[in-house]
Image (spheres, rainbow, N blue to C red):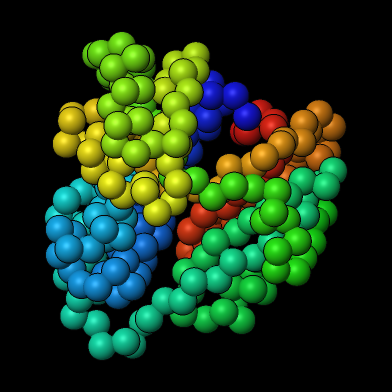
C-alpha cells in the first residue's frame, strides 16, 4: 500500500470514527483497561503500554477526562469485567488475508460474531497462523507533512537517533517504522521533540498486497470489514487488500 493510501486510509478511518465516537471510545476504553492490568498500574510514567494506549486514544480525539475516567475505572475494578485478548485469522474474497484482534469478556460470543462477519463476505475463518506469516508486526508512526514544519531530513535523523528502523517519505506524509519493542521509546522521544503524529501504534503491515478490482469482491470484503468494525469486541482489523474503501 502506498504511503498516500496509508494516510488517506487513516483519515478515512478517523472520519468514520468521528461519526461513531461512542463505539470507538468504548473500544479505546477497553485498551486502556487492559493496558492498566497488563502493564503494571495506572501511572503512565511507569507503564509504557498505558502510555502508548493513551497516545492512541488522544490521536482518536478521545477527551482527556474520558481517558482519565477509563483509567481510574480500570484501576479500581475487581476483575468482574476482565477482558482477554483473542486473535482470529482467515480469508476474504480473492484470497485476501485478514487478521482480527479482539478484547472480549466472552470468547464464544466474539468467535461467533467474527465467523459471521467472514461468512457474510464470502470468506472463512482459518486456523491460528494461517495468514499472520504474510504480515510484519511493526510500530508505525504517521506524520502529516502539512503539520510538520521541519524538512524530511530533520525528521528522519530524529527518528533514527530515537531508535527507528526505517523512514519513508510519501506524497503527503512521513512514515516511521520501529521494532515493536522499540515503539514506545521512539514515540515518546518524537513526542517530546514536538513532532505532531497523525497516528502512532503497533500494527500489522502486509508484506505484499492483493489488488481487488472485481466489484463483487470489493463489496464482499467491505461487508466483512463493516461488520467487524461494528463489533464492540473487535479492536483492530488488518488485511492485505488494496482497494478503494467506501
Q: Toward which corner of the image does residue 173 lie, by quadrant?
A: top left
Spot occupied by residue 61 in the image (x, y as percentages of width and height)? 28, 42
Q: Is residue 192 above or below residue 224?
A: above
Q: Position of residue 133 (x, y in %)?
A: 69, 54
Q: Is residue 64 left or right of residue 2?
A: left
Give the quadrant of residue 39: bottom left
Q: Name the residue at 77% across, 65% down.
A: 126
In front: 111, or 132?
A: 132
Who's the residue at 25% across and 13% down the image?
A: 150
In the picture provided, is 201 more to the left or to the right than 130? left
Does residue 157 sit above or below 116 in this rendering? above
| Quadrant in the picture for residue 152 | top left
Q: Nearer the viewer, residue 123 or 199?
A: 199
Q: Tell me residue 60's x, y (percent).
A: 33, 43
Relative horizontal placement of residue 184, taking residue 47 as reference (left or right): right
Residue drawn 53% across and 30% down?
6
Q: Residue 110, relative to residue 170: is it above or below? A: below
Q: Is residue 142 above or below residue 39?
A: above
- Which quadrant of the figure contains the C terminus? top right
Q: 25 or 183: which is nearer to us? A: 183
Quadrant placement of the N terminus: top right
Decide which of 92, 162 is in the foreground and name it: 162
Q: Residue at x 49, y 18 (%)?
A: 170
Amino acid at each position: 500500500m502506498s504511503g498516500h493510501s496509508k494516510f488517506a486510509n487513516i483519515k478515512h478511518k478517523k472520519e468514520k470514527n468521528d461519526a461513531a465516537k461512542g463505539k470507538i471510545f468504548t473500544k479505546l476504553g477497553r485498551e486502556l483497561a487492559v493496558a492498566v492490568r497488563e502493564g503494571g498500574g495506572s501511572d503512565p510514567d511507569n507503564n509504557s503500554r498505558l502510555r502508548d494506549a493513551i497516545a492512541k486514544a488522544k490521536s482518536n480525539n478521545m477527551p482527556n477526562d474520558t481517558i482519565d475516567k477509563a483509567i481510574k475505572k480500570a484501576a479500581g475494578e475487581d476483575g468482574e469485567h476482565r477482558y482477554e485478548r483473542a486473535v482470529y485469522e482467515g480469508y476474504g474474497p480473492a484470497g485476501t488475508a485478514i487478521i482480527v484482534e479482539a478484547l472480549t469478556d466472552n470468547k464464544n460470543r466474539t468467535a461467533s460474531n467474527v465467523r459471521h462477519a467472514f461468512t457474510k463476505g464470502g470468506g472463512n475463518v482459518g486456523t491460528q497462523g494461517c495468514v499472520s506469516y504474510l504480515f510484519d508486526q511493526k510500530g508505525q508512526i504517521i506524520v502529516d507533512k502539512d503539520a510538520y514544519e521541519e524538512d524530511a531530513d530533520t525528521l528522519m535523523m530524529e527518528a533514527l537517533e530515537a531508535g527507528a528502523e526505517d523512514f519513508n517519505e510519501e506524497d503527503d506524509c512521513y512514515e516511521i517504522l520501529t521494532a515493536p519493542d522499540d515503539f514506545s521509546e521512539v514515540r515518546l522521544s518524537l513526542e517530546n521533540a514536538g513532532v505532531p503524529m497523525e497516528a502512532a501504534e503497533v500494527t500489522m503491515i502486509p508484506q505484499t498486497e492483493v489488488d481487488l478490482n472485481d466489484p463483487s469482491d470489493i463489496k464482499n470484503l467491505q461487508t466483512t470489514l463493516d461488520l467487524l468494525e461494528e463489533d464492540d469486541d473487535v479492536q483492530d482489523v488488518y488485511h492485505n487488500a488494496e482497494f478503494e474503501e467506501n
